[in-house]
Amino acid sequence: MGIPLFKTGSAAAQLRPPTTKQLGDQAEDQALAHLQRAGLRLLDRNYRTPGRGGGEIDLIMRAADGTCVFVEVRRRASSSHGGAAASVSWIKQKRIVFAARYYLMRLSALPPCRFDVVTVQAGHIEWLAGAFEAGEM
């Protein structure tokens, strides 16, 4: 399977492989479609806390039971170096939890929450519900 090319007008641009950002956006689109087919509803995408040193959440979804689901999407071409799921480090989890807490501060009532990871690796999507917890972070 070859690398998809993006048409932009010039012949030289058509030969360039997609950027990491473009591949990441594609993975987020695939993850979003997968979660929506499973009945989750999108609340926010690429939510960032203001200022430097904060966190970012790829997808914020609402499950049918009202649970607020904070989703980290990871894309990897292969499983070498531990694969996509293994790339969600403790520090990354801490930043996601920080951003989730900031997001929740604006709500009048706190819903049940969950932290999921969706991996897109070698054309396969895997949804890890409850991949980690806020705990003492």
Image (cartoon, grey):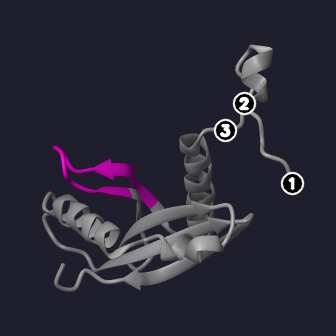
Position in image of residue 124 (x %, y %) = 72, 69
Circle 2 crowding by C-alpha within 10 Å: few under 14, some 14–19, many from 20: some
User: What is the CA distance from the residue labelled 3 to the residue labelled 2?
Assistant: 6 Å
Judging by the rendered image, the residue that carries numbered circle 1 is 1
Of the residues shown, which amino acid type is indicated by label 2? Arg
Verify CB contact (< 8 Å) between mark 3 and mark 2. Answer: yes
User: In the figure, residue 132 lies in which quadrant?
Assistant: bottom left
Judging by the rendered image, the residue that carries numbered circle 3 is 18
Residue sitting farthest toward the front: 81
Q: Residue at x 48, y 70 (%)?
A: 87
Of the residues shown, which amino acid type is indicated by label 3? Pro
Of the residues shown, which amino acid type is indicated by label 1? Met
Q: Residue at x 62, y 62 (%)?
A: 76
Q: Nearer the viewer, residue 41 or 17?
A: 17
Q: Residue at x 73, y 31 (%)?
A: 6
Circle 3 crowding by C-alpha within 10 Å: few under 14, some 14–19, many from 20: some
Q: Tell me where the magenta segment starts and ends, as one range.
A: 42-57
User: What is the CA distance from the residue labelled 2 to the residue labelled 1?
Assistant: 16 Å
Q: Nearer the viewer, residue 61 or 39?
A: 61
